[in-house]
Amino acid sequence: MRVTRELLDIARTVATEAGALAARRRSEGVEVAASKSSVVDIVTEADRETEALIRGMLADLRPQDGFFGEESGAEAGTSGLTWLVDPIDGTVNFLYGIPHYAVSIAVVEGDPDPLTWRGLAGCVTNPASGETFTARDGGGAWLGDSEIHVADAVELPQALINTGFAYGSEMRAEQGAVAGTLLPRVRDIRRLGTASLDLCFVAAGRTNAYFERNLSPWDHAAGAIIAREAGAAVKGRGDAPAGRDFMLAAHPVVAAALEELLEELGA
């Protein structure tokens, strides 16, 4: 327990400083530095600068640990722990000045593979709103100093669902078709553009469920720990762990019903 508390303290400290840097860069104006997998998959200089700050701080505080970041790649450690970092999750929101983006930092036991790792601690902070979500293994989930929990179970017609779309045009078309078919079957659908915060919103009871395909490990590492500790089922298809193929987070009763419906819709 003491170790996970220390790890969470580090995640929170680093995320707070990185969030302050990201917010300063946002106030100064943001431009696209490059595109990655597609023209809509962008990176800004602020992404790179923020990750460099995080990587440097973690190297000073935990030099024996591994690191896996969205912008600067992976580096193995010797401790058996790995830090998963998304320096600015929701980069398109960040670019457009939409105040819904986050710094996401998690530490896991094992390799940076969501199918095998054990999530130990995570922090997701939104510099624009000032909200910070945290959790550690066995320690519950928190928004600031208040413990948070998933919303009570509801029937799917009363469920508010979060989702997201991949960068590749072919998969985006498939996901859009599923969302269109799902929409009449639920209360409503939100596409907010920041996977880590989508998971935290489930944890805080602001939405009833979140699902998405094609997420990278840094997209969901911290948010998944927070949702799990808030009482959500965080899973892949069937008995599989959540990963790139599929992620679903919701109250366990809602998760079971939504997974069945999504399978029927071909999600």
Image (spheres, grey):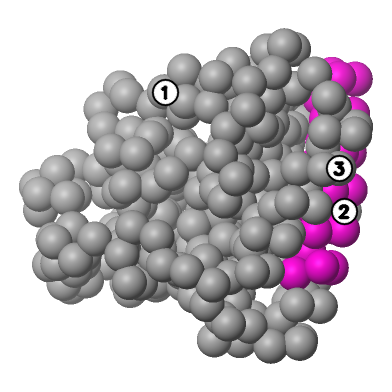
| Kind of residue indicated by mark 3 | Met
51 drawn magenta: no
| Residue 267 at x, y percent in the picture | 17, 50
Label 3 sits on residue? 57
Q: Look at discs 2 and 1 and give the one toward the viewer.
A: 1
The numbered dot on residue 261 is none
Residue 103 position in % (x across, y down):
69, 58
Whether residue 116 sits left or right of residue 9 in the image: it is left
- Magenta: predominant secondary structure element? helix
Question: For this rendering, which residue is in front, 7 or 112?
Answer: 112
Image quadrant where residue 137 sits: top right
Q: Secondary structure at mark 2?
A: loop
Q: Point out the image quarter for the N terminus.
A: top right
- 2 or 1: tag closer to the N-terminus: 1
152, 147: nearer the viewer: 147
Q: Position of residue 185 (x, y in %)?
A: 19, 66
Residue that carries the numbered disc 1 in the rendered image: 115
Q: Earlier in the sequence, mark 1 or mark 3?
A: 3
Which stretch did the figure color magenta? 1-22
- What crowding class fits label 3: few (fewer than 14 Cα within 10 Å), some (14-19), or many (20 or more)? some
Q: Residue at x 39, y 47 (%)?
A: 215
Residue 145 shows which numbered tag?
2
Q: Residue at x 72, y 61 (%)?
A: 49
Q: CA distance from mark 1 to mark 3?
A: 27 Å
> Compared with residue 205, is residue 160 higher up or lower down, i.e. above or below?
below
- Residue type, numbered disc 2: Asp
